[in-house]
Image (spheres, rainbow, N blue to C red):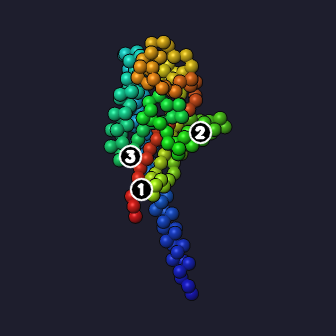
Amino acid sequence: MNIRPIIFITILLCTFSVQAESAKEFETQANAAIKEFAETLKSALMLSMQTDGSVKTIAVCKDIAPRVAEQVSTKYNLDVSRTALKIRNPENKPDEWEKTVLRSFEKRLEKGETIKKLSFSEQVETDGVKQWRMMKAIGTDLVCVTCHGEKIPEPIQAKLKKHYPDDQAKGFSVGSVRGAFTIKQIVPAD
C-alpha cells in the first residue's frame, strides 16, 4: 500500500488547520485593536466637541488620532491606521488592496448590509512578503457630518483648508461609509 497520498493529505490538513488558527488569532487581535482605537478616538472627539467646539475638534483627528494609532499598533504588535476613498490627510491614502475593500464595503452597504458588519480580512502576499490584512468600515454618524458632511460651517471649512488644502473628505451623509480602520501584520517566515 502506498502511504504517500495519506501523508500528503495529513500534512495538507495540518497546514490548513494552522492557517485557520492563525487567521482566527489575527482577527481576534485586530478586532480588539480596532475597538480600542475607535473607542479612544470617539471619546476624545466627543469630549472635545463638548468642551472646545467643532473648530478645535479638528485637532483630535489631526494630532491625537495618529498618536492613538501608534499606541494601539505598539500594544497589539500590528500596523493600525485609518483610510478612505475620499481622504483628508494624505498620509491616510489607501493602497490598491484597501481601495478594493472600501469599494466592496460600499456595494455591500447598498445591498442592505449594516455598517457594523462591514469587515474583511485575508492573507496577501506583496513583493514576496506575506501579511494578514483586515479592514473594518467606519460609518458616518450625525456628529461626523459637522466636518465631513454636505454643509460644513464656514469657520470649520477655513480651519480644514488651512490644515488640509487638498481635502476630499466631505459630502458624506449619515449612514454612509466614511472610511475604514485598516490593520496589517507581517506573517513570520516558516
Residue 6 appears at what percent x and percent y? 54, 77
Q: Give the vertical position of 119 relative to 1 (above or below).
A: above
Q: Residue at x 36, y 16 (%)?
A: 51
Q: Tell me the quadrant of the picture where the N terminus can be found.
A: bottom right
Residue 177, located in which quarter of the rendered image? top right
Mark 3 residue type: Leu
Q: Which mark is residue 78?
A: 3
Labelled pair 3, 2 in contact (Cβ < 8 Å): no
Left or right position of 78 against 170: left
Mark 1 residue type: Val
Left or right position of 55 against 99: left
Labelled pair 1, 2 in contact (Cβ < 8 Å): no
Q: Give the vertical position of 177 relative to 96 (above or below).
A: above
The foreground one among 20 and 122 is 122
Q: Residue at x 38, y 31 (%)?
A: 65
Disc 2 crowd rating (10 Å Cα; few below 14, some 14-19, many 20+) is: some
Q: Is residue 56 visible?
A: yes
Query: Looking at the image, is mark 3 or mark 2 earlier in the sequence?
Result: 3
Q: Tell me the quadrant of the picture where the C terminus can be found.
A: bottom left
Mark 2 residue type: Arg
The foreground one among 187 and 158 is 158
Residue 21 appears at what percent x and percent y? 46, 58
Q: Residue at x 66, y 37 (%)?
A: 111
Q: Residue at x 49, y 71 (%)?
A: 11
Question: Disc 1 marks which residue?
Answer: 187
Q: Which mark is residue 103?
A: 2
